[in-house]
Image (spheres, rainbow, N blue to C red):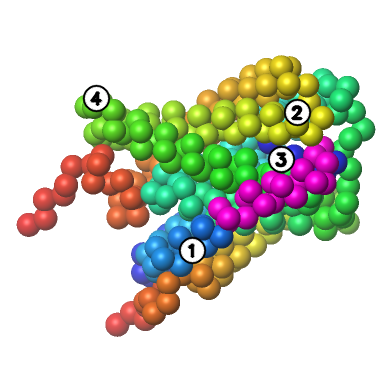
Amino acid sequence: MHIPDGFIPLWQCAIYFLIAAPFVYLSLRWANKELDERKIPILGVLAASIFAIQAMNIPIPWGTSGHMVGAAMAAIILGSPFAGILLLTLVLVVQAFMFGDGGITALGANILNMGVICSFVGFYGFKALGSIPVKRLKEGYNALSFNSFVAAWASLFIASIICAVELWLAGTFPLAEGLLFMGLYHFVIGVIAEGVITSVAVVAVVRYREDLFAFASNYLPRRVTA
Amino acid sequence: MNRNARLILVGLILAVIIASLAPFLASSNPDGLESAAEGFHEAEGKEASYYEAPMPDYVFPGMGSEGAAGVVAIVSGTILLLVLGLGVLVIVRKQGDGPIFPREG
């Protein structure tokens, strides 16, 4: 979903930079307030992993492919949308400046779509699912895995819809067909790449380091320590 | 080894494995946005380049083998993000916090 240079007129690019900037600032404020020596290593590892997994395009039908974004994964594990925004900002800057993936002028729009929107949808989607008063959605690894899957899928799908609208406003995509194709492709990419990998990764991190998982007390039984 | 160092090591190994496999396993089909753009005449010829990246399209320049050039590019990006991520976080985190790698003993 990386928008290249040229797809969005410069004045609109400037608007997206202005919209994304306060969120990036708030993510730095979040890091300044919340990060301690326990959380920094997992965030560093997630930054590297998100970059690596984004290079792994998975084929989908219609001769298309797609990859995971990873913002929802970071937001769910660390328990804040700002974790996803901060990491995706770093990843997108490196991708644009080192690898030419995503335009320099479109960086604001890309941070807005894949950083801000994916993180907020992933985080609040996950929170909302966990608050539905159904036991199966509230407890245990199955609930954790299902809620992560759905929230991550929604994060990619909704970001792709907003991306289609931005490209329509830019005069690069027609509205109806843009929504249809962006929505269709990312519906499928969201299931295969974003949903499945987020679900597996969240469960793996929680099994390995339960103490890092912000929502541990919601999902996991309290350990009896004698 | 303390648990922070172990987490970084395990995470880095996993990320480097994914990064090394990516050039061989990743689909070369256009991604969702590129595929959509190919179908719209409005998008034709719009893509521009205002900047020359040092490793365009995840290929390290000047290497004979395409696979190896991809591995070098993606693995170096992965390591760069680990170092950059940890560096930025250590700078912006709250002050007066304990060390990430406390001396054992």
Which of the chains bears the disc numbered 3? A
> Residue A136 versus residue B28: which sits nearer the camera?
A136
Q: Tell me the residue that label 1 is attached to.
A: A29
Residue A168 marker: 2
Query: Label 4: few (<14), some or many (≥20) within 10 Å?
Result: few
Q: Is residue B56 above or below residue B25?
A: below
* Mark whose residue sits in front, 1 or 3: 1
Considering only order in the chain, which callout, 3 or 1, is on the residue closer to the N terminus? 3
Image point 45% across, 60% down: which residue?
A30
Residue A137 marker: none
- Quadrant position of the C terminus of chain A in the picture: bottom left
The amino acid type found where label 4 is placed reads: Val
The amino acid type found where label 3 is placed reads: His
Q: How far apart are marks 1 and 3 (CA)?
A: 26 Å
* Mark whose residue sits in front, 4 or 1: 1
Q: Is residue A22 magenta?
A: yes
- Residue A165 appears at what percent x and percent y? 69, 29
Q: How far apart are marks 1 and 2 (CA)?
A: 33 Å
Q: Tell me the residue that label 3 is attached to.
A: A2
Image point 33% across, 50% down: which residue?
A214
Q: Do marks 4 and 1 share a chain?
A: yes
Query: Label 3: few (<14), some or many (≥20) within 10 Å?
Result: many
The amino acid type found where label 2 is placed reads: Trp
Q: What stretch is highlighted in magenta?
A: A7-24
Image point 51% across, 43% down: which residue?
A119
Q: Distance between the residues labelled 3 and 4?
A: 37 Å
> Residue B72 versus residue A79: which sits nearer the camera?
A79
Q: Is residue B31 left or right of residue A9?
A: left
Q: Tell me the residue that label 4 is attached to.
A: A134
> Residue A134 versus residue B104: which sits nearer the camera?
A134
